[in-house]
């Protein structure tokens, strides 16, 4: 596998593309969603947009798909993915657990400051520890509601 520096710019570009798409076409949170987001640490829940999809669009980019597969992200169904204040949620997987998990990732983006900064930390973690053991993933699981 290539080193992190060769993947990072491509993943950040892919993430920013989807962030923009979701911000343009996604739905705002209702008051209940904003309250849930606040409860897991999100500072600006009004900026969150959600797009419901049949599946996360990993396969559109061969590099992203290969990386996601290599770190174990595709070993089961991926139910959601977050890019800053933009979230994809798989329609068939909607639950308080998934929403709260993804909202915690929004908080992590807010703390780290940008998509690039988040992806730098996140990719290093998943490449070092694997998807399920990455500290940012473990943190998000600790804030899941209803699990």
Image (cartoon, rainbow, N blue to C red):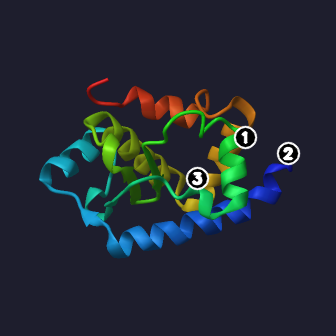
Q: Which residue is mark 1?
A: 70
* Gap between marks 3 and 1 measured at Cα: 19 Å
Instruction: Judge the density around disc 1: few (<14), some (14-19), many (≥20) Cα neighbours within 10 Å.
Output: some
* Gap between marks 2 and 1 measured at Cα: 9 Å
* Nearer to us: label 2 or label 3: 2
Instruction: Judge the density around disc 3: few (<14), some (14-19), many (≥20) Cα neighbours within 10 Å.
Output: many
Which residue is at 36% across, 76% downward? Answer: 24
Q: Quadrant of the C terminus?
A: top left
Instruction: Give how far across and how far down residue 125 sits, in percent.
Output: 67, 38
Q: Which residue is mark 3?
A: 118
Q: Is 46 placed left or right of 71 in the picture?
A: left
Q: On the image, which quarter does residue 116 sit in?
A: bottom right
Q: Which residue is mark 2?
A: 1
Q: Which label's residue is closer to the chain start, 3 or 1? A: 1
Q: Which label's residue is closer to the chain start, 2 or 1? A: 2
What secondary structure is marked by label 1?
A: helix
Q: Is 50 placed left or right of 130 in the picture?
A: left
Instruction: Judge the density around disc 2: few (<14), some (14-19), many (≥20) Cα neighbours within 10 Å.
Output: few
State if disc 1 and disc 2 touch (CB < 8 Å).
yes
State if disc 3 and disc 2 touch (CB < 8 Å).
no
What secondary structure is marked by label 2?
A: loop
Q: Is 31 placed left or right of 124 in the picture?
A: left
Which residue is at 41% across, 26% downward? Answer: 142
Q: Is 91 placed left or right of 65 in the picture?
A: left
* Gap between marks 2 and 3 measured at Cα: 21 Å
């Amino acid at each position: 596998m290539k080193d992190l520096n060769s993947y990072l710019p491509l993943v950040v570009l892919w993430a920013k593309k989807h962030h923009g798409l979701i911000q343009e076409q996604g739905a705002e949170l209702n008051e209940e969603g904003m309250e849930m987001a606040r409860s897991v640490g999100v500072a600006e829940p009004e900026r969150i947009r959600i797009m419901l999809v049949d599946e996360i669009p990993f396969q559109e980019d061969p590099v992203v798909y290969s990386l996601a597969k290599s770190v174990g992200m595709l070993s089961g169904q991926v139910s959601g993915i977050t890019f800053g204040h933009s979230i994809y949620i798989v329609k068939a997987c909607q639950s308080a657990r998934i929403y709260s998990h993804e909202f915690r990732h929004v908080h992590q983006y807010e703390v780290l400051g940008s998509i690039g900064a988040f992806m730098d930390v996140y990719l290093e973690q998943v490449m070092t520890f694997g998807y399920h053991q990455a500290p940012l993933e473990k943190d998000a699981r600790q804030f899941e509601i209803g699990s």
